[in-house]
Image (cartoon, rainbow, N blue to C red):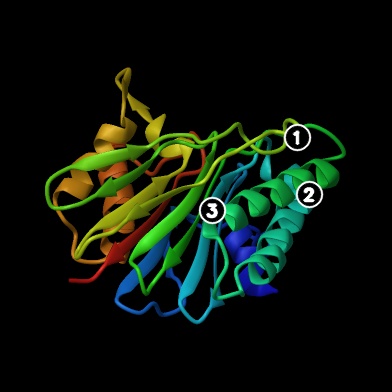
Amino acid sequence: MKSLLSRLGFGSGAKEPTQLVHATSPDLNGAELAVAYFSGRAGGDFYEFSRVSPNRTLFGLLDLAGKRDDSRPILTAAQACFRASGAELFSDPELNEAEAMVELARRLNLEIMRAAGGVRSCPAFAGCYNEELGTVCYVNAGHTPGLLCDHESIEELPATGLPLGLFSLAPTDARIVGLGPEGAMAIVSRGVVEAQCAQEEFGLNGVKLVMGGKPPSATELSRGILEQLQGFLCSVPKHNDVTAMSLRRAN
């Protein structure tokens, strides 16, 4: 329970200094998945990753609208749905990953609306990394674009549907992208891209700057994004939750 609450950002209630926190996923074959965030979160960011088959790992970054204390029951319900539905939908070795991702998004959407008792916007980026193929099948439900970096360029992965929690029958699509050797993917919360200093936004360009430096691990990429953000702001971010999730394939 402690691990689940820490991923949702709920602690003991004691006030602690804000600090950079990072965590890694279960071991991946030839890749690494990691997340970094600043403690003391007050909004609705939460992350999850879960191994769903011998060669697949599911991951997600969600940004539920509203204050964290009011959002706790919804976040807890969404995380439980993510884990249970992920394990059910992705366990078949012959599954259609795109269909499974769309169904996962549909279930999350309905569960968020059920737990909220109505409409509650929740942009979400969820993906399934296939370790055998080096591919990611993902949905981007109104979230900030993911970024895919290879040796030559950085590609934006825009929304494939509306945010979760708005419409019970909201459609979404799934896409599949490949990670080549030493390729990386980064997903950041809205608090990262909207951070401002002297009327200038950190934006996706700030994230791309870090990715372009080719950090050697997912841990260093996630941490580097938030350290770059902290330097941009000249302080620990306090305007909103800031979270960075990264996936990096080995050579």
Q: Disc 3 or 2, which lies upstream in sequence?
A: 3
Residue 14 locus on image (x, y percent): 64, 60
Give residue 141's mark: none
Is the residue 196 above or below the residue 141 in the image? above
Res 111 label? 2
Residue located 70% across and 63% down the image: 85
* Residue 103 drawn at (x, y percent): 67, 52
- Quarter-of-image position of residue 196: top left
Local secondary structure at mark 2: helix
Query: Looking at the picture, which amino acid does disc 3 mark?
Result: Ala
Q: CA distance from mark 3 to mark 2?
A: 20 Å
Q: Which residue is mark 1?
A: 169
Looking at the image, tell me whether mark 3 or mark 1 is earlier in sequence order.
Answer: 3
* Tag 3 residue: 98
- Amino acid tagged 2: Glu
Front position in the image: 144 or 150: 150
Judging from the image, what secondary structure is the residue with disc 1 in? loop
Assign the C terminus to one quadrant of the image.
bottom left
Q: Residue at x 69, y 70 (%)?
A: 88
1 or 2: tag closer to the N-terminus: 2
The residues bearing labels 1 and 2 have C-alpha atoms spaced at a distance of: 12 Å
Residue 65 sits above or below residue 103 on the image:
above
- Disc 3 to disc 1, C-alpha distance: 18 Å
Residue nearest the observer in this picture, 37 or 221: 221
Q: Position of residue 216 (x, y in %)?
A: 18, 65
